[in-house]
Each structure stands twice: as C-alpha cells, then as structure tokens.
Amino acid sequence: MAVGDQKTVEINGTEYILQKPPARWIFQMTDRSTNKFGIISKEKYADELIKGVVVSPKVTLDDITEISEVTELISEAEEFLGKK
C-alpha cells in the first residue's frame, strides 16, 4: 500500500474515507502520543489518528459522541495502516 491510498469504511451508518499518510508521520504521531514513561495517551493517540487518517468526513475526536464508534474507527484505521 502506498502513501495516499484510500479505503472507505462504514461505522454506524457513516462512511469514513481513510487515507494512508507517510510512514514518518505514523512514527511522529506515536511519539507525540507517548508520555515520558513510554505510555501512550489514548486520548492524544485517538485524536491524532483521526485527524491524520480520516479525510472524509473531516471529523475530530470531539465530533464523535459514541465511544464504540471511536473504538471501531481507530481499529479500522490501525488495520488500514498495518498496525494490527
């Protein structure tokens, strides 16, 4: 899969278009989401992942009200990026 490749997923009736960012962005995003003890902040990670991978509709973590929808969207994004 190349940078810019896209995948459409449907979650709770909403279609999300995911777009693959460069590998460097993935590493930088993970670094930004990790605290000084090496523990990933779930909130920072989810926020950055949604902002950087979901290209349509353009949403933020605050726009999604159901935790199950956030969890599924993150799971789909991670699978798309090859992190699972």
Image (cartoon, grey):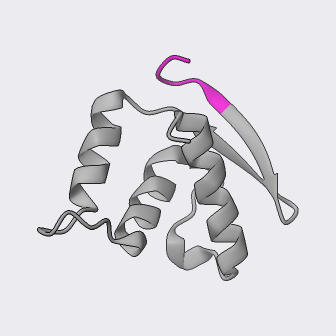
Residue 58 at x, y percent in the picture: 58, 56
Q: Is residue 4 magenta?
A: yes
User: Which sits in the foreground, 65 or 78?
Assistant: 78
Apparent side of residue 2 relative to residue 24 in the rendered image (left or right): right
Say which residue appears at 71% left-offset and 69% top-offset. 69
Q: Main secondary structure of the magenta part?
A: loop
Q: Is residue 41 left or right of residue 49?
A: left
72 over 53 or under it: above or below: below
Write the residue at 51% across / 32% down. Answer: 20
Q: Is residue 50 above or below residue 52?
A: below
Q: Give residue 7's quadrant in the image.
A: top right
Q: Residue furthest top?
A: 2
Which residue ends up furthest to the right in the rendered image?
Answer: 13
Q: Is residue 79 above or below residue 50?
A: above
Residue shown at 59% from the left, 75% from the top: 63
Location of the N terminus by quadrant is top right
Residue 22, picture quadrant: top left
Please state the extent of the stretch shown in magenta in the rendering.
1-6
Across and down, in percent, residue 62 comes to 52, 78
Front position in the image: 37 or 41: 37
Q: Quadrant of residue 70?
A: bottom right
Question: What residue occupies the far left of the structure in this picture?
Answer: 36
Q: Residue at x 53, y 33 (%)?
A: 82
Classify the position of the C terminus by image quarter. Answer: top right
- 49 with respect to 17 (left or right): left
Disc tally is 0
